[in-house]
Every structure is written in structure tokens, then in C-alpha cells.
Amino acid sequence: MRKSKKSRKWLRNLFLTFALVIVAGIIYGVYQYNSGLAMADDGLYKDDQKAYDPFEGADVEFDQINVLLMGSDARDEDGRSDTLMIAHYDQTTNDVKLISIMRDTYVDIPGHGMNKINSAFAFGGPELVRKTIKQNFDIDVNYYALVDFKGFPKIIDLLAPDGIEVDIPYEMSYGIGMTLNPGKQTLHGDGLLGYVRFRHDRLSDFGRVERQQEVLTKVKEQIGVSSLMNLPKILGVADSYFDTNVDNKTILTIGKGIVKGKSSMDTLRIPVANSYADKRVNVGDVLDIDLDKNKQALEEFLSSKDNEKMAKTDEISSIKLAIQ
């Protein structure tokens, strides 16, 4: 009888402890989220009422998630996306792959003919960008995220509070509102934003894409348990700077997987080296690509285990071409 009472008391105390942990977790999450909201300024997507066509992303298959990332330094008058990426996440292996598509890539936009790929967003929002990628590269995208780069410094500082080490080859100042001096150094939010925005060098937009991939790769390497604990605050900050159809449950699943995973983030740029030509057409200067060659590169990148070698070869070839 006495043993039974002790057992019931132990179970009751265990239940109360468990309940207190859950309540404390909810309170912590709400507090962190509200703290994030307080940190955010009036970003492009705070109370954004702009309506887009329904996003008809493919259902996730074989635990492979593709998220279309579109960003801009500001909401341009013509509404074109400034940065276009596809983030690929494998839920089984926790591998992350990042594909950057150059904004001047000359493609067939459904219903609008041949144009720069960054025009697709202006013509029809995220859904037309998805259709354009599917038609030209045969890649199914499941979700989208629109990013206002004004929020980049705040989010990066939460994900990588110790900063990101970079090696700046020459002074960067024109068009970024600051001066970044040459040499190895650790940059934080605003400095990193200037670093990934700069494109007034001999590599032009190719250099900017390379720096964006470099920073995102290094941020991914720093993500740990502390970043996961900061997730509610990150979501609060992101509320004003992101417009996405990725639900919080999926974000949490991906976040946990990245924290648990030990792999690096592989990157690829489209068009790949030796697969395009600079061309002047009725819509301006474009990258006239070999579509078949780039589709093959994408297929190999998303399936090959030797992605790091291929990406590095592509990067070296690009630099040689730019110097020539």
C-alpha cells in the first residue's frame, strides 16, 4: 500500500515536472519571438498586402526539399528579383546544397518569351519563377521565400554571433555605403551585407554570387544548438523581412536536421563555366546559355557525391575566364 502511494507520488511529480518544462518552453518561445519582432524594423514584407498568384509547388518526394530563394536590396520599381537561389535539403542525410542562378540568365519565361530570368518575378511573382525554372531546368520547387536584405544583418548576427571570417582582396566601397579594407578580417551583420552586395570589380555579378555562397556556407558551418535555441527570435525578426510559404514546423525540422548534420554546404552557379556567352539582345545584356549543358550540371550536382570538386572546378574556371 505504502509502495503504491510512493509510486503514484513519483508519477505525479514526473508529470508536473514535464508540464512545467513544456510551459516554460512555450513562454520562452513566445518571449524570444516577441523579442525578434521588437528587433525588426519596417521591412518590405511587414504587413505586406501584395497578392501573388497561388504558388503551386510540387509535393515533397523522397525527403528532398527545394526552396526557391529570391531577394533584393530594395523593392525596385520594375519589381525584378536581385538574387535568385534554390536551397536543396535532404531530410535523410541532412545535406544542404545551394544553387545560385545568375539574374541575367537568358531563358524562356512561360507566356512572355525569352528574357532575363529575374524578369519572371516582375511578370508573375514566385509562381512564374517556379514555372520558369521547371520549364527551363526541369527542377521541381516545393516552397518559396522572398527576402528583404535589410534584415540580413540582424538574422546573420543571430545565426553567427561570432561573425564570419573573410579575406577581402581589395578595397570595396562603391555602391555599398561603407568601405571594406583589404585583408583577412571578421565581419558582422552590416559589414557582411556590404561584402555580399559589392559587385563593382572585374568579376561583376559573378563575384557577388561567389561571395554570397561563401558567406552562406560559413554561416551554415556555425549553426549549432545555440542557433536552434534562437530560432523563435530569428522567426520574429524574419517576420518583417521574409515572405514565405514554408511553415514553421518544416523550418524547425530543417533547423534541427542542419544542427544534427555534420556535412558542409555544397554550392553551384548557373550558368556553369564554359556554358554561356555574353550577348546583347532587345532586353539588354544577357548570358546566353547552353541549356542542355546546364541542365546536365544541375542533375549531376543534385545527385553526385562529388559536388565539392565540381563546384571548385567551376569557380576556378570562372576566375580564369574573367581575367582573360
Image (spheres, rainbow, N blue to C red):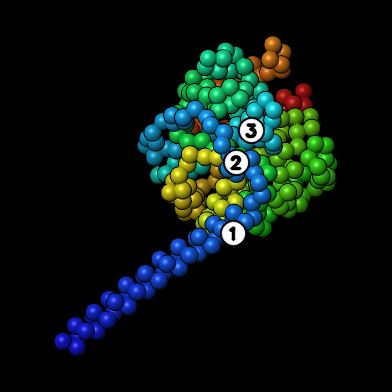
Which of discs 3 and 2 lies nearer the camera? The answer is: 2
Element class at badge 1: helix
Element class at badge 3: strand
Q: Residue 210: x, y in percent?
A: 67, 36
Q: Residues within 10 Å of mark 1 (few under 14, many from 20)?
A: some
Seen in the image, is 90 located left or right of residue 218? left
- Taking depth in this image into account, of 122 and 145 the one nearest to the observer is 122
Q: Residue 65: x, y in percent?
A: 45, 38
- Taking depth in this image into account, of 299 and 219 the one nearest to the observer is 219
Distance from disc 3 to disc 2, alpha carbons, whole Å, reads 16 Å
Q: Residue at x 73, y 49 (%)?
A: 190
Q: Which quadrant would the C terminus be assigned to in this image?
A: top right
Q: Does residue 281 lie above or below 233 as drawn?
A: above
* Residue type, numbered disc 1: Ser
* Residue type, numbered disc 2: Tyr
Q: Does residue 17 lie above or below 305 as drawn?
A: below
Return the disc, 3 or 1, that comes first in the chain's sequence: 1
- Taking depth in this image into account, of 216 and 141 the one nearest to the observer is 141
Q: Is residue 174 visible?
A: yes
Q: Are marks 1 and 2 in contact (CB under 8 Å)?
A: no
Q: Residue at x 67, y 34 (%)?
A: 75
User: Which residue is under mark 3?
Assistant: 83
User: Which residue is under mark 2?
Assistant: 45
Name the disc covering residue 292, or none.
Answer: none
User: Which residue is under mark 1?
Assistant: 35
Q: Residue at x 16, y 87 (%)?
A: 1
Q: Residues within 10 Å of mark 2 (few under 14, many from 20)?
A: some
Q: Does residue 28 lie above or below 259 as drawn?
A: below
